[in-house]
Structures are given as C-alpha cells and as structure tokens.
Image (cartoon, rainbow, N blue to C red):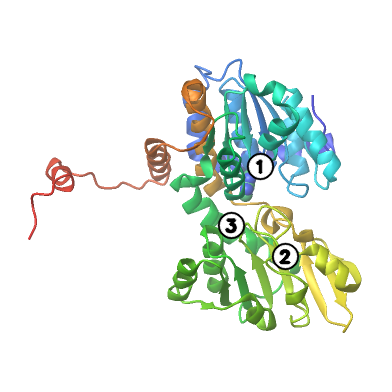
Amino acid sequence: MSKVKDPSLAGEGRLKIEWAESRMPVLMKLRSMNKRERPLKGIRIGACLHVTKETAVLVETLVAAGAEVFLAGSNPLSTQDDVAAALAAAGVNVFAWRGLTEKEYYWCLEKVIEGGPNITLDDGADLVSTIHSKHDNILNQVLGGTEETTTGVLRLRAMSKEGKLRYPIIAVNDAETKSDFDNVYGTGQSSIDGIIRATNILFAGKNVVVAGYGHCGRGISKNARGLGANVIVTEIDPIRALRARMDGYLVMSMNEAAKIGDIFITATGNKNVITSEHFRQMKDGAILANAGHFNVEFSIADLRSIAKSRRLIRENNEEFVLEDGKRLYALAEGRLVNLAAAEGHPSEVMDMSFANQFLSVLWMLKEGKNMKPEVYSVPRSQDEQVARLKLESMGIKIDILTAEQERYLSSWREGT
Ligand code: ADE
C-alpha cells in the first residue's frame, strides 16, 4: 500500500535510484552480502526519512535483506516525488509527497505506525516521539530504532534523561563515518547547492554569515570560502567560536553580523537564532537560508509579521518587503535548504551514513533484546568496518601496525 504524488513518475525515479546505486558502493556491497541469507526476513521496518534517491538505495537494501519497509518522509519539502513513485512501484509501502501539510505529514507517520514496526528508522525523532506519545500500545513489539540526525539524537537523549524512552536507539548520527563526512562535506556542499539553485547568485565576494560552527557549520563555511566568499561565523559556544577564528573566519555576534551579511545560513539546531531584531538591521537584498533540521532557526513567523508584502520570486525563493522598503529573501520557507531546494547530500557521503543505518539495524536485530531503553553509540568496530569498505571502494590502501608498534602503543615503559 502507498500514497505518493504521481505514480507515473516511477520511471524517472528509477533512473535516479540507479545513479545513486552507482555512487554507493559500500551499501551495495552490504546488499550483495545479505541478499542470500536475508537476515531481516519477517522484520517490519518503519522509517521516517527524507525520501531521496539515496534513501531508496537504503530501503531496497533492507528489502533485499528480507525486511518489509513502511516509509514516510521526514520533512514536508524534502520528498523527491519521482523516487517515491519508483519505490511504490517496486512494492514498498511509501506514504510521502513533496509539499504535504502538517496534518498530512502526521497522517503519513500514522500509516507507517499502522504497519506495526519491529524496528524504527528516524531522521529527527518524529516517528519515535509519535509512537511514544500516541501509540504506546505497540511499544512492546518494537525491538529498537536508529536515529540519523543531530537534532533527533538531542531529542531522544532528552527523552531518555526524563525516563520517557521505552526502547533502545542507536545514534547513527554520532558514528565518525557519519558525522565527520555527511554533516561536514554533505551539508557543506548540498546547502550551498540549494542556495545556488534557488537564487543563482555568485558567492565570490559576498559576506556569508554562518550561524553555528558544529560539523555542519564547519562544512558550510569551508565550501563558502572555497567559492570566494568572506565567511563570518556566529556562535554561542566559546570553544567552537575560537575554532572558527583559528580556522580563519571572522567571529562576531549576530547583531553585528546582521548589518553586513549578504547571505545568512543557519546550522545551529536551535530556534530563533535570527529574529525581527536582526531582520531590521539587515541590508537590502539579504538572503536567508536554513540548513538545520527544523524551520525554526531564522524566524519565518517574525519575517511574515514585519513584512508589508511578500511574493514568490522564483522557486524556493520568497521576497519579503519590510515597511522601509527593504527586501529580504527567505529560501524554501526556512526548511532545510539542501533538501528542499536541492537533492540533499550527495550519494557518496550518504553511502557511509546509510551503511551505518543498515549495520545498526542488523545489530539491533541481534542485540536489541539485551539493550536498555537508552541512546547507544555505534560500536567502534562498525565505524571502522564502514571506513574500510569505503577506502576499499576508492582503491586506497592504508598501513597496518607492526606487532612492535602495537606493543609500544599499549605500553608505558619506553620514554625519553
Ligand atoms: N539527509 C541529507 N541528505 C540526504 C539524502 N540525500 N538522503 C537522505 N537523507 C538526507
């Protein structure tokens, strides 16, 4: 069963999925290693993920390993309708289309929950929180889940701290082969890709203000500088602020940055980082984009309330005219610009993120019964396995410690 925008788009979606497969060698290798034994036979997986060509490769890997998958999108604007159609045509239970309302978004989650998941895959923790708050009757059939993103892990840790989490979660986001690559290089490239698709502006010579210098902010800053922009970072964490400064960026408060920025990109995971106080100080023509999970980082509500008029100037680019005639441009309604205005992270990094998802599902299947309802890190051995498979696919060989070196590293006896 499925509900997608237009089933006739399946052919186009299938071509996109095949393209992604050709760039995701690690996940494809895991697929071929598991398709004969089908370790997930009889397992129902409920997933709330961005419905992209890369997600399709993950879903079809889970299906090849025997699972039945129920999939909803994890953001109203991130679903690629052709990919959703292709998955539906292949028999996956997909409930997703681009541009759904909040009510429809939760309807899709309900459909996934109706599937009766044994394992959940979440990106942002909406599926886990809906199951816990509205469907606690199914909790005993859920073995555990995984979480893909920083914001989701934060929410789940908060649930766990309050004693509200009822099944174990593996924080895929925190694997090094996920956050050091997907969050940095993936967000870094795809956010700028989204801004360029929505505006076609030149980055060279612009003042780009990046709010937040975590993994995502670091990637965005690096890519913006690579295009010739002058990058300004705003932070609340003194260590991250120092890191940004020593990486060669200007660091200042948002109040100062608001006056000189040409493009503002939020990547904080927090709300109200840019509000009307800042909008009023901005230059005519300033562009606002969000790379964080939720559409709360720059206040679109504030922007709507202080604007005297607004119009869509081109796809994913809305012009707001303030009382004094100043024009500000908000991209993709403040939703994550990389997925709403572009195609999300490139397949090459999602390869590692989703290899971690797949291996975490297998781990959950094996160990879930013995795990506590807490948030778990990906085991180091899994992280290293993903890195080794990725290196192998790239034809890169690395050195191996000699027995003497291993002994040296684990001993305190040798010194000056
Ligand atoms: N999150 C960011 N980019 C993504 C992609 N390409 N597919 C799924 N989830 C994503």
- Left or right: 26, with 209 as reference point: left
The answer to whether 366 is drawn above or below residue 183 in the figure is: above
Q: Nearer the viewer, residue 13 or 360?
A: 360
Check disc 2 and give the amino acid type. Phe
Find residue 87 and report its horizontal and vertical position in percent.
72, 32
- Residue 350: which quarter of the image? top right
Give the percent coordinates (x, y) of residue 194.
69, 61
The answer to which of marks 2 and 3 sits earlier in the sequence is 3
Q: Amino acid at mark 3?
A: Thr
Q: Does the beta carbon at disc 1 come under 8 Å from ligand 1?
A: yes
76 vs 54, nearest the viewer: 76
Which residue position is annotated with label 1?
A: 53
Q: Measuring from the top left, give residue 403's x and y in whole percent.
A: 14, 40
Q: Residues within 10 Å of mark 1 (few under 14, many from 20)?
A: many
The answer as to whether callout 3 falls within 8 Å of ligand 1 is yes
Labels 2 and 1: the sequence-earlier one? 1
Say which residue label 2 marks: 298
Left or right placement of residue 415 versus residue 335 in this view: left
Side of 273 where 321 appears, left or right: right
Circle 1: element type: helix
State the CA–CA distance, disc 1 to disc 3: 16 Å
On residue 160, the disc is none
Q: Nearer the viewer, mark 1 or mark 3?
A: 3
- The residue where tag 3 is placed is 187
The structure residue drawn at horizontal position 64% and vertical position 60%, both measured from the top left corner, is: 191
